[in-house]
């Protein structure tokens, strides 16, 4: 039965691939544009998905308030950029400070959310923490809506249309390029943090076994806080970048982005950092392809279909650890 | 025991029936329904303010039939299911006439309640064709032109003035946006000579619209028509410009107004949209705009003046009928000519407004300017 399933999958993929190749050869530039568009979108998903997957890896909690941290990053950047813009500061300084403040604020929120909403529930059933996360998400959304405004606010792009980029602007804009480059840099830095630093080692140890880690002298609470802070920082970067890309911000942008990033994290194998990146890129590119070659109406339907199909064949995600090995 | 309960229930019901006339007090209650929370709140709030100021003006002149008017406000959040509850509440609170709603889907849902209660409803903003053209809502009137009229204008302008050969139709999958684009498609087909190269819906509030923008570019459309609201429109417009796509963006009244031009900023330049006629030289228009400015310290929003006209129409009908009787008031609605901020308006046999139509606007120097 399982073999039949796989055969069927391969057959469908083969037919799709055949038609795909015909389309690609007919218009390769269009294909490239769609791939790059998908990469941009996937990069944003990846920046958010990292937070989901790292937190899940360490405390097995799905942090539903994570999309809101991303939104707060974008909001903070908007406020800082507008105020500094009014004072007539140099645009380079504004970019730097907007990013810095966005990261700082998002980290502070991520840290506080963990301390208020999750830490007291560390030994409670997992469902309680999940409900607490949803509550936190609603709280932050409404808080920003009331403190700011329910309307969309224009976000003047912090990244200029570079002159040297003009010949390529019709394929991929300067902002999209910056998004992809920034994401790659963030990924490399994060990889190094996890692999080579002391705190990274502590994170990996905590993810493997929380009790054992504390027995060998790792301050588990500090590791968890650090994880939230790091995840929030990448989400904030994603928030500022996407706001530059689409040019507007409101209190609700974190919801859809958060859901999509969550799917991406599950797709890649929740708990796995490379998995989150891979899942995000797969999701972003396939959404873009689907809109490009089929119907954009069904883009979301398609995203969820992919999720279901992958979870049928690989229940723990593309790069997820096999559940059985844990038991 | 059971029969006692039955008797009690019956008694209570009878009491409610007899209590009903008690509502007809010293004031006339006017219900206003619309979206005043969420993304679309600016539209609904502008309408409620129009109603408020119209009521103030009428009350200063002695109200309707010698009675002061009292305003009841409801929020439908643009959702049909909320609208039904809200309408039920307005009716049970004793509303005797209704101004609203804003979103067409909500109006259609809520009107079941108003129709059963025998109330006239005048909408400042709901433009869906079905509301008037299907004949299912005899108690419904509106002070804004319907979508078909708008689609007709759009399609002939795109063909004759913009000389377009290929158009892409993109919408937000909602009642309003998709409906508008389906109508546009119908009118384009009727007109002939124009190829529809793309008909797509997008997810409103999506993280990124670059795939659809690439698709528009590939379709080589001369004109991209948009059915939907300002926030998604501004994202798509700016991406089209950033990706150097040579297409003219054309939207409906969902993107008319300062909301769109501030959001899209410099990318909004050159965008076309159809919207209600510019009547800003009308003396009453100027007068109530000044009142709005004084009361709320800002310029009136999109449906403010239409909402003012709604209240005027209801008041005039009641005065002419001499009572709040449904049939008499409805008959009066068709006969009256009202000196409104939109000019002199009346209603045709379907309940659609006569005398307040649509024009084409283009963004020039960051402001919508009438071009036809």
Image (tube, coloured by chain):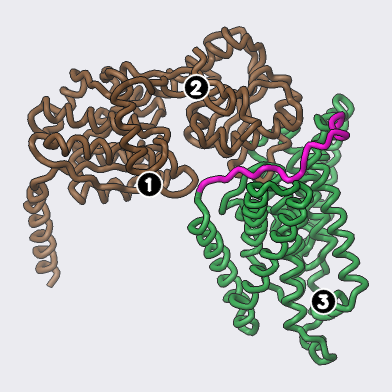
Chain colours: A green, B brown
- Of badges 1 and 2, nearer the viewer stands 2
Residue B184 percent location from the top left of the image: 53, 20
Q: List the residue tagged with mark 3.
A: A203
Image point (34%, 38%), residue name: B292
Q: Is residue A158 magenta?
A: yes
Which quadrant would residue A110 be assigned to in this image? bottom right
> Would residue A306 be visible to someone looking at this image?
no
| Disc 2 secondary structure class | strand
Q: Are marks 2 and 3 in contact (CB under 8 Å)?
A: no
Is A64 left or right of A200, judged from the image as shown? Answer: left
Looking at the rendering, the stretch of residues picked out in magenta corresponds to: A151-168
Rendered position, B81 above or below A127 = above
Distance of label 1 from label 2 (alpha carbons): 26 Å
Task: Tell me, for residue A233, which label it has, or none.
Answer: none
Distance of label 2 from label 3 (alpha carbons): 57 Å
Mark 1, chain letter?
B
> Would residue A115 be visible to someone looking at this image?
yes
The single residue placed furthest to the right in the displayed view is A196
Task: Tell me, for residue B76, which label it has, or none.
Answer: 1
Residue A176 percent location from the top left of the image: 79, 42
Residue A40 percent location from the top left of the image: 78, 45
Image point (76%, 74%), residue name: A226
- Of badges 2 and 3, nearer the viewer stands 2
Task: Tell me, for residue B274, which label it has, or none.
Answer: 2
| Disc 1 secondary structure class | loop
């Amino acid at each position: 039965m399982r073999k039949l399933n796989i055969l069927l999958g391969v057959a469908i993929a083969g037919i799709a691939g055949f038609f795909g190749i015909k389309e690609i050869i007919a218009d390769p530039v269009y294909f490239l544009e769609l791939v790059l568009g998908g990469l941009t979108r996937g990069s944003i998903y990846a920046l958010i998905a990292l937070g989901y997957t790292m937190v899940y890896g360490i405390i097995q909690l799905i942090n539903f308030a994570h999309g809101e941290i991303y939104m707060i990053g974008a909001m903070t950047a908007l406020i800082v950029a507008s105020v500094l813009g009014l004072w007539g500061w140099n645009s380079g300084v504004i970019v730097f400070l907007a990013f810095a403040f966005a990261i700082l604020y998002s980290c502070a929120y991520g840290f506080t959310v963990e301390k208020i909403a999750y830490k007291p529930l560390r030994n409670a059933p997992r469902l309680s923490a999940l409900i607490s996360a949803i509550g936190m998400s609603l709280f932050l959304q409404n808080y920003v809506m009331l403190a700011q405004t329910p309307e969309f606010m224009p976000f003047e792009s912090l990244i200029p249309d570079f002159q040297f980029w003009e010949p390529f602007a019709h394929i991929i804009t300067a902002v999209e390029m910056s998004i992809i480059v920034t994401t790659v840099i963030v990924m490399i830095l994060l990889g190094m943090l996890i692999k080579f630093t002391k705190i990274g080692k502590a994170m990996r140890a905590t993810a493997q076994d929380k009790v054992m880690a504390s027995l060998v002298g790792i301050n588990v609470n500090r590791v968890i806080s650090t994880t939230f802070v790091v995840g929030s920082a990448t989400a904030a970067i994603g928030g500022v970048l996407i706001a530059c890309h689409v040019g507007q911000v409101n209190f609700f942008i974190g919801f859809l982005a958060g859901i999509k990033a969550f799917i991406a994290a599950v797709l890649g194998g929740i708990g796995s950092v490379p998995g989150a990146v891979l899942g995000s890129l797969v999701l972003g590119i396939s959404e873009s392809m689907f809109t490009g070659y089929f119907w954009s109406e069904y883009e979301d339907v398609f995203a969820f279909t992919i999720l279901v199909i992958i979870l049928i064949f690989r229940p723990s995600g593309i790069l997820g650890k096999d559940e059985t090995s844990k038991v | 025991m059971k029969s006692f309960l039955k008797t009690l229930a019956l008694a209570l019901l009878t009491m409610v029936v007899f209590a009903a006339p008690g509502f007809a007090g010293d004031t006339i209650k006017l219900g206003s329904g619309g979206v005043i929370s969420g993304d679309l709140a600016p539209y609904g709030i502008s309408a409620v303010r129009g109603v408020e100021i119209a009521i103030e003006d009428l009350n200063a002149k002695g109200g309707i039939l010698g009675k002061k008017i009292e305003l009841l406000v409801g929020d439908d959040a643009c959702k049909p299911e909320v609208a039904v509850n809200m309408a039920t509440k307005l009716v049970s609170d004793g509303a005797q006439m209704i101004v609203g709603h804003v979103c067409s889907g909500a109006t259609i849902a809520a009107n079941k309640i108003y129709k059963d209660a025998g109330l006239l409803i005048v909408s400042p903003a709901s433009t869906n064709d079905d509301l008037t053209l299907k004949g299912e809502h005899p108690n419904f009137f509106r002070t804004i032109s319907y979508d078909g009229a708008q689609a007709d204008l759009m399609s002939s302008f795109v063909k004759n003035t913009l000389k377009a050969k290929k158009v892409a139709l993109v919408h937000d999958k909602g009642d309003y946006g998709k409906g508008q684009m389906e109508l546009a498609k119908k009118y384009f087909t009727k007109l002939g000579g124009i190829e529809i190269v793309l008909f797509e819906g997008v997810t409103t509030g999506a993280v990124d619209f670059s795939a659809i923008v690439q698709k528009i570019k590939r379709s080589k459309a001369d004109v991209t028509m948009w059915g939907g609201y300002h926030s998604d429109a501004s994202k798509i417009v700016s991406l089209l410009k950033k990706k150097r796509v040579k297409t003219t963006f054309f939207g409906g009244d969902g993107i008319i107004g300062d909301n769109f031009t501030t959001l899209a900023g410099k990318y909004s330049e050159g965008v076309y949209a159809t919207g209600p006629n510019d009547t800003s030289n009308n003396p009453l228009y100027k007068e109530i705009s000044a009142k709005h400015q004084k009361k709320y310290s800002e310029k009136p929003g999109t449906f403010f003046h239409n909402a003012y006209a709604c209240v005027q129409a209801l008041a005039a009908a009641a005065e002419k009928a001499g009572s709040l009787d449904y049939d008499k008031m409805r008959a009066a609605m068709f006969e009256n000519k009202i000196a409104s901020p939109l000019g002199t308006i009346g209603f045709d046999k379907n309940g659609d407004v006569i005398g307040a139509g649509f024009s084409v606007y283009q963004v020039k120097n960051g402001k919508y300017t009438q071009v036809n």
